[in-house]
Image: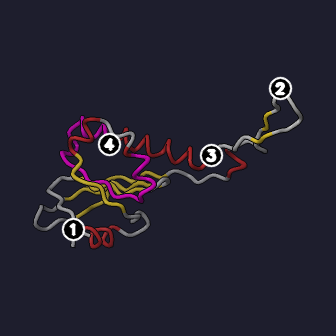
Amino acid sequence: MDKIKVGAGDWVVVCDGRKALILENIGDGMFPNLHMKEVHEHPDERTSDVGTDAPGSVHPSIGTARSSIEQTDWHDESERVFLKGLAGRLHQAVLAGETKALTVVASPRALGMIRADYSDAVRRVLHGEVHKDLVKMPVYEIEKQLLA
């Protein structure tokens, strides 16, 4: 993998569907030094706490056959809502001038979800995306994986 370039003050956002780390480079482009700026976490609730019981069924107007309706995946839905909120936070940060450039590091699944919610302002300052799940690693290890 090519190493990413992060300038002074740039953000590296490391996330998955339940947790997001916003890291800021307090070093420079030559010697990056990532430090934790914000942590966002989303609780992983039990399906029985967030959903209904059994999937529904449909009774056709003709005949006696029944067909089931697939149950909503509440975990998937809650991850989408979390990532949409994160995209909103990034939009606010760009508009407020908190960062002039950012890189998003996420699992391919989470990256696909958040990409749909990027605003035009976020797209303009987005330097790159890295398809890796590094959110459970300590900051020094993330830095080593991405910048060394």
Residue on which disc 2 sits: 61
In the image: residue 56, left or right of residue 140: right
Q: Give me the residue at 76% from left, 42% from top.
A: 68
Judged by depth in the image, the label closer to the viewer, 4 or 2, is 2
In the image: residue 8, left or right of residue 43: left
Separation of marks 1 and 3 at Cα, in angstroms: 36 Å
Type of amino acid at the residue the image marks with label 4: Leu
Q: Earlier in the sequence, mark 3 or mark 4?
A: 3
Q: Earlier in the sequence, mark 1 or mark 3?
A: 1
Residue 106 horizontal/vertical position (percent):
38, 58
How many neighbours does mark 1 have within 10 angstroms: few (below 14), some (14-19), or many (20 or more)? few
Residue on which disc 1 sits: 3
Label pair 2/3, CB-CB below 8 angstroms:
no
Asked if residue 102 is positioned above or below residue 30 in the image, the reply reads above
Separation of marks 1 and 2 at Cα, in angstroms: 60 Å
Q: Earlier in the sequence, mark 4 or mark 2?
A: 2
Residue on which disc 4 sits: 90
Label pair 1/4, CB-CB below 8 angstroms:
no
Q: Is residue 111 one of those drawn in magenta?
A: yes
How many neighbours does mark 3 have within 10 angstroms: few (below 14), some (14-19), or many (20 or more)? some
Type of amino acid at the residue the image marks with label 3: Trp
Q: Give me the residue at 50% from left, 41% from top.
A: 81
Q: Quadrant of the N terminus?
A: bottom left
Separation of marks 4 and 2 at Cα, in angstroms: 49 Å
Magenta segment boundaries in residue numbering: 90-114
Count of number-bearing discs:
4
Which disc, if any, is residue 74? 3
Judged by depth in the image, the label closer to the viewer, 1 or 2, is 2
